[in-house]
Image (cartoon, grey):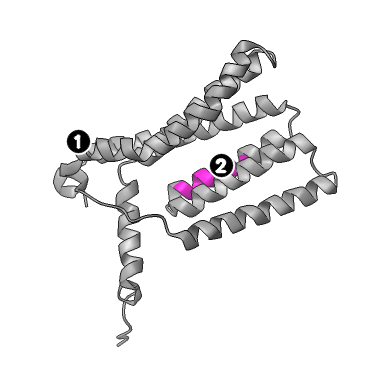
């Protein structure tokens, strides 16, 4: 008889805790909904920049909103998620207090991003992509890679692959840079919002006793 320990018993307590916390953080879909809304907000400002000519008051206001409102939404999203969970979802999800982000993992993500950026710059030097297109391709690839790495669940991996593919496809089509980013952020926002809403609806339809 094989008495080798199960994979669960071979994990360190920190690894088990991280996996359980990660699962708890993504079981209700709220982080994805927040990301989707942030992307769609950025998309709204991007479309204003596409519609109105450069230098017009509306174009300047869109640029200002993109530079101020979107970062504010990013910073406030975690507070909003915690507020919704504490006010409406405590009976289903319980209360979880998350530790600060692991710096080692963050530096790993930045390292991957740097390598991808270097590869893209090499493609530009080899005239494989026009200068504007590489920004779309790089953005799609980096956001997709970060989504898959940070999510680590099948739906995040699939979403990350779709984001990367969208960026590459847009890079191969002759769009202006502003139009390309507007389309890219629209696709990313809709994908994240739809995924989060589906997960949230499935989450709230489960009996309270079935929620881990």
Question: Residue 189 at x, y = what percent?
Answer: 49, 32
Question: Residue 48 at x, y = what percent?
Answer: 59, 17
Q: How many marks?
A: 2
Residue drawn at 54 percent across, 59 percent down: 107
Ranked by sequence position, the earlier of labels 1 and 2 is 1
Answer whether residue 199 is visible to the viewer in this image.
no
Q: Which span of residues is magenta-colored?
A: 156-165
Does 16 appear above or below 189? Answer: below
Residue 136 shown left or right of residue 6 in the figure: right
Tell me how far mark 1 sits from mark 2, CA to CA: 34 Å
Residue drawn at 66 percent across, 29 percent down: 180
Query: SS for tag 2?
Result: helix
Q: Which residue is mark 2?
A: 162
Toward the right, the furthest residue is 126
- In the rendered image, which quarter is residue 1 located in? bottom left
- As for residue 163 lying within the magenta part, the answer is yes
Residue drawn at 38 percent across, 35 percent down: 76
- As for residue 33 lying within the magenta part, the answer is no
- Local packing at callout 1 (Cα closer than 10 Å; few below 14, some 14-19, many 20+) is few
How would you classify the magenta stretch by its main secondary structure? helix
Question: Residue 131 at x, y = what percent?
Answer: 78, 38
Answer whether residue 191 is visible to the viewer in this image.
yes
Q: Which residue is mark 1?
A: 87
């Amino acid at each position: 008889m094989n008495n080798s320990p199960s994979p669960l018993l071979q994990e360190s307590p920190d690894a088990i805790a991280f996996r359980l916390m990660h699962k708890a953080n993504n079981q209700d879909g709220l982080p994805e909904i927040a990301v989707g809304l942030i992307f769609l907000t950025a998309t709204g400002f991007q479309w204003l920049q596409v519609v109105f000519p450069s230098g017009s008051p509306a174009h300047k206001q869109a640029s200002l909103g993109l530079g101020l409102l979107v970062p504010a939404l990013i910073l406030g999203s975690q507070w909003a998620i915690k507020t919704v969970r504490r006010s409406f979802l405590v009976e289903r999800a319980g209360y979880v207090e998350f530790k600060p982000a692991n710096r080692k993992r963050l530096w790993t993500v930045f390292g991957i991003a740097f390598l991808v950026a270097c590869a893209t710059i090499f493609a530009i030097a080899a005239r494989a992509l026009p200068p504007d297109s590489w920004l779309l391709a790089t953005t799609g690839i980096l956001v997709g890679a970060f989504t898959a790495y940070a999510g680590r669940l099948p739906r995040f991996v699939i979403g990350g692959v779709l984001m990367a593919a969208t960026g590459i496809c847009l890079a191969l089509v002759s769009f202006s840079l502003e139009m390309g980013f507007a389309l890219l952020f629209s696709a990313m926002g809709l994908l994240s919002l739809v995924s989060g809403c589906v997960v949230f609806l499935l989450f709230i339809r489960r009996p309270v006793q079935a929620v881990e």
